[in-house]
Image (cartoon, helix red, strand yellow):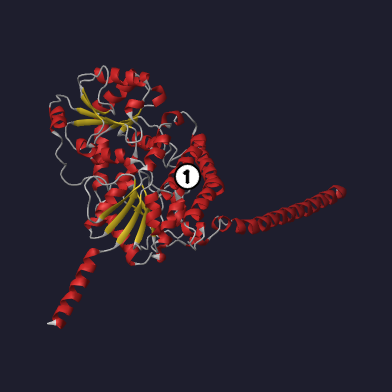
């Protein structure tokens, strides 16, 4: 009996051990609900695949899951809130002046998470994980969690490929046709656009390497004093980068083998969830359709200046459509009867409704993904970050119109809304894009889970690592080769020039001598 019991106990241990799967640590530091939504979708996908995920973030679960463990960092919300309060002021600045402000926010968020008591307690425990999944958003010091817990580093970009993600795995970004994600260009740039793109990428490179990364290195050394890896070596040891993007939503470009597009993980691909009764009745009662209006999670509509709110209300009042407006106060003075306000809406499920005819958005990546997936044309009011590029892309592809915030007034706003709804080409284009976006051999979440598991199984999958990670800036761009070749080529050109000159002079002398002899003979 004892041998049988031992056998069954061992078999049970093996089976349950395999069923439990891997253990992951996920670091979601931004304090932005939209960024968290992407990471949370991946976390839930991993738990559904039988793994355990510990999440460091300021957004703990409302309904706890036994395989999803929260490490709550609420102080990040106050740090993020201080930066969000300056969004409208920062939007008035040039991109060159906004860029250092973005990185200052990144540094503040990086340190706020690392010094949080809950994180310090976690670092003090004798734990190990099979993988560390870290959101990458100007927070390079956080990559130290991977070595601290003896795990491969996987990064998750809630945007597409950026200047702070591409160099992690050696992904090339030729400025001739890969526009920077903060610029309003597409992949077909004229001379001056290519010049601006090159100039800004050069500016980013020097700012990153001379100013931002040295400050991140200080945080890395302060909070991970026992890590053996050099800071820059640690960054280039990244095993995998997951991008919240898809080629149908952006531009074709090269990627390293361990940079994978998984855009749209957060979108519900099953039947939409039932809408609350009051929202459903408002939508179903709309004779001409409904417009959904949201400026995202980082900027509140209630914080817009009074003159802008007045222009918006004047516009919405005269529309024949009903409007669901994400407005973060319980009341709105002079609210039109065709407008329903709430500080929260189930956006994905609303956009899935057939009576929604358009989406007024800030142009955030998650919102533009959802609008394309559900086939809704957009009117965009971009404020910061990649929103300008997203809306420039929407205009080029023909499914949206941009309204410049600085010039926003009732006539221009109304014109954009009516044009995007009345002109059927906008709807036709977004339906085509929706078909392209949906046409994938597996869902983005399935693809993300597979690659996370693959890198875990293969102990970091070093064979995916690009050799470019071992090259210096000079070697990568062949500047040392050019430094040798150019003088040699220049010398050859000079010698060829002197040789040709010598031959021509000799020939001229011979011709002149023959001519002189003939003259004398006459």
Looking at the rendered structure, the secondary structure element under dot 1 is helix
Most extreme residue toward the right, as rendered? 520
Tell me the residue at 40%/34% (across/down).
84
Left or right position of 338 against 307: left
Q: Is residue 429 visible?
A: yes
Q: Is residue 138 visible?
A: no
Q: Is residue 390 above or below residue 331?
A: below
Indicate the position of residue 467 as horizontal and vertical percent values: 48, 62
Query: Which of these two is toward me, 39 or 358?
Result: 39
Left or right position of 127 against 511: left
Indicate the position of residue 130 as horizontal and vertical percent values: 34, 63
Quarter of the image for residue 79 reads top left
Left or right position of 158 against 349: right
Q: Is residue 232 above or below residue 192?
A: below
Q: Is residue 217 above or below residue 456?
A: above
Label 1: how many residues lie within 10 Å, few (<14), some (14-19) or many (20+)?
A: many
Q: Quadrant of the N terminus?
A: bottom left
Q: Which residue is mark 1?
A: 107
Query: Which of these two is toward me, 71 or 53?
Result: 71
Indicate the position of residue 272 as horizontal and vertical percent values: 16, 41
Query: Which of these two is toward me, 184 or 186?
Result: 184
Indicate the position of residue 464 as horizontal and vertical percent values: 40, 63
How many badges with numbers are in the image? Answer: 1
Q: Is residue 519 above or below residue 446?
A: above
């Amino acid at each position: 009996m004892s041998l049988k019991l031992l056998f069954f106990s061992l078999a049970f241990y093996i089976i349950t051990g395999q069923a439990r799967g891997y253990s992951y640590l996920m670091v979601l530091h931004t304090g932005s609900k939209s960024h968290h939504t992407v990471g949370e979708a991946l976390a839930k996908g991993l738990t559904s695949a039988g793994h355990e995920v510990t999440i460091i973030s300021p957004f703990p679960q409302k309904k706890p899951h036994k395989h999803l463990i929260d490490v709550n960092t609420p102080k990040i919300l106050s740090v993020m809130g201080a930066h969000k309060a300056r969004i409208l002021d920062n939007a008035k600045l040039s991109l060159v002046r906004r860029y250092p402000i973005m990185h200052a926010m990144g540094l503040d968020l990086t340190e706020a998470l690392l010094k949080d008591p809950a994180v310090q307690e976690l670092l003090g425990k004798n734990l190990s994980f099979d993988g560390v999944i870290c959101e990458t958003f100007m927070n390079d010091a956080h990559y130290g969690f991977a070595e601290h817990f003896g795990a491969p580093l996987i990064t998750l970009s809630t945007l597409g490929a950026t200047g702070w993600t591409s160099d992690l795995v050696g992904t090339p970004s030729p400025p001739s046709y890969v526009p920077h994600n903060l610029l309003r260009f597409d992949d077909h740039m004229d001379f001056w656009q290519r010049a601006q793109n090159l100039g800004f990428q050069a500016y980013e490179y020097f700012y990153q390497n001379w100013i931002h990364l040295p400050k991140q290195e200080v945080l890395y050394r302060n909070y991970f004093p026992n890590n053996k890896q050099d800071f820059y070596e640690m960054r280039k040891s990244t095993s995998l980068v997951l991008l919240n993007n898809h080629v149908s939503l952006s531009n074709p470009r090269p990627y390293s083998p361990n940079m994978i597009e998984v855009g749209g993980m957060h979108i519900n691909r099953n039947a939409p969830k039932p809408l609350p009764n009051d929202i459903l009745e408002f939508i179903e009662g709309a004779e001409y359709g409904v417009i959904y209006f949201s400026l995202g999670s980082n900027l509140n509509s209630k914080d817009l200046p009074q003159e802008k709110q007045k222009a918006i209300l004047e516009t919405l009042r005269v529309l024949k459509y009903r409007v669901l407006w994400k407005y973060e106060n319980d009341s709105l003075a002079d609210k039109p009867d065709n407008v329903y306000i709430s500080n929260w809406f189930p956006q994905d499920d609303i956009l899935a409704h057939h009576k929604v005819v358009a989406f007024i958005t800030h142009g955030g990546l998650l919102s533009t993904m959802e609008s394309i997936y559900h086939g809704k044309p957009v009117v965009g009011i971009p404020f910061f970050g990649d929103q300008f590029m997203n809306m420039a892309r929407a205009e080029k592809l023909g499914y949206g119109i941009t309204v410049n915030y600085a010039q926003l007034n009732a006539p221009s706003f109304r014109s954009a809304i009516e044009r995007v709804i009345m002109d059927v080409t906008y709807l036709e284009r977004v339906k085509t894009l929706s078909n392209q976006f949906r046409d994938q051999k597996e869902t983005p979440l399935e693809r993300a889970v597979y690659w996370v598991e693959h890198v875990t199984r293969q102990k970091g999958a070093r064979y995916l690592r690009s050799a470019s990670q071992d090259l210096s800036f000079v070697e990568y761009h062949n500047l040392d080769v050019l430094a040798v070749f150019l003088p040699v080529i220049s010398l050859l050109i000079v010698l060829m020039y002197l040789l040709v000159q010598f031959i021509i002079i000799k020939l001229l002398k011979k011709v002149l001598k023959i001519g002189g002899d003939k003259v004398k003979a006459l």
